[in-house]
Amino acid sequence: MYKVLISDFEDVLIDKEDAIPLSTMLALDKVRGDKVAFGVTSTRGFQNVLDYNRDFPFIDYIILFDGAYFYDVNRKKTIVDQKISLTTTKRINKICSDYNICFYTLDYCNCTKDLLPIESARLIGDFKVFSEFHKDSIYKIEIICSKKNQGSLIDELKKIKDIMIVSLTDRIVIQKDGTGLVPSMKEFLESKKLKMNQVIVLGKDEYNMALFQEDCFAIAVEDASLKLRRVADEVTDSSNGNPIETVISKYFQ
């Protein structure tokens, strides 16, 4: 019945040592041999995720930036590609120049100030040079600021067309309008003539929330947030165990 398995990469597929257990890769290899596609959602850079697939190929699809980028590993083909335009990037930079701005490209998070949110982040130096070099490769922008400082910024940002704005406790997240795991997944499934109820999604992070509320079979790991566990169809092993192997033995054997 189930034809697609989607899993969080961080905290679910990889273990505490930043590795993937051989037993997990063998389990995935077996179900992929039974015509089950396996995809990962990740907050890492594209090449970083792809490197895990180099010696023992077991990933069929890579989904980044909450669905803004969807890549077919086997065909080496991009399925969904929702970038923010250079014009929009420059307007956002001008409006928010007093704050630390993080521009997410396929392989790096580039920051304007001396505050690096993730390991792969780097300082961009001159924005003009950065914007010219990355003019066609920005998928997500984060404005690092407290909740109390967001009001006026959001009012200004709303004047920009074709962007989606999400307000969080310590930042504002901006992506191209229409971006998301749900529309990307639906576009992918339509191309494969599959339905959402043929998909199992295994996750820990709250960015899965919208997808968990669709007609897929949603499984949260035991140490996921309470919000995610509440909307899940099932709760399985914690991310410290082998949740993917548990799901495979239960639903794909």
Image (cartoon, rainbow, N blue to C red):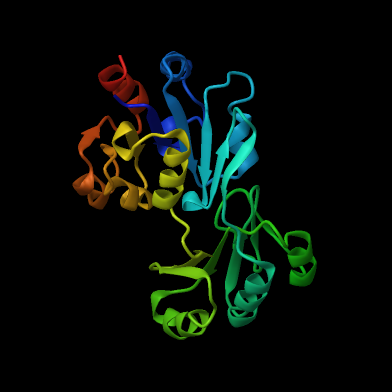
Query: In the image, 19: left or right of 168?
Result: right
Any part of residue 15 in sight: no
Is 149 rendered above or below residue 187? below
Is 15 rendered above or below residue 163? above
Is 224 rendered above or below residue 146? above
Residue drawn at (65%, 69%) of the image? 113
Question: For the N terminus, which image quadrant?
Answer: top left
Residue toward you, 49 or 190: 190
x and y percentages locating residue 170 in the rendered image: 43, 68
Q: In which quarter of the image is residue 148?
A: bottom left
Question: For the C terminus, which image quadrant?
Answer: top left
x and y percentages locating residue 147 in the rendered image: 39, 75
Any part of residue 232 in sight: yes
Residue toward you, 61 or 114: 61
Residue toward you, 224 or 133: 133
Is 141 rendered above or below residue 28? below
x and y percentages locating residue 203 in the rendered image: 35, 40
x and y percentages locating residue 198 in the rendered image: 32, 32
**Tag count:** 0
Residue toward you, 195 or 225: 195
Residue drawn at (44%, 54%) of the image? 180
Query: In the image, 114: left or right of 234?
Result: right
Residue drawn at (46%, 48%) of the image? 184
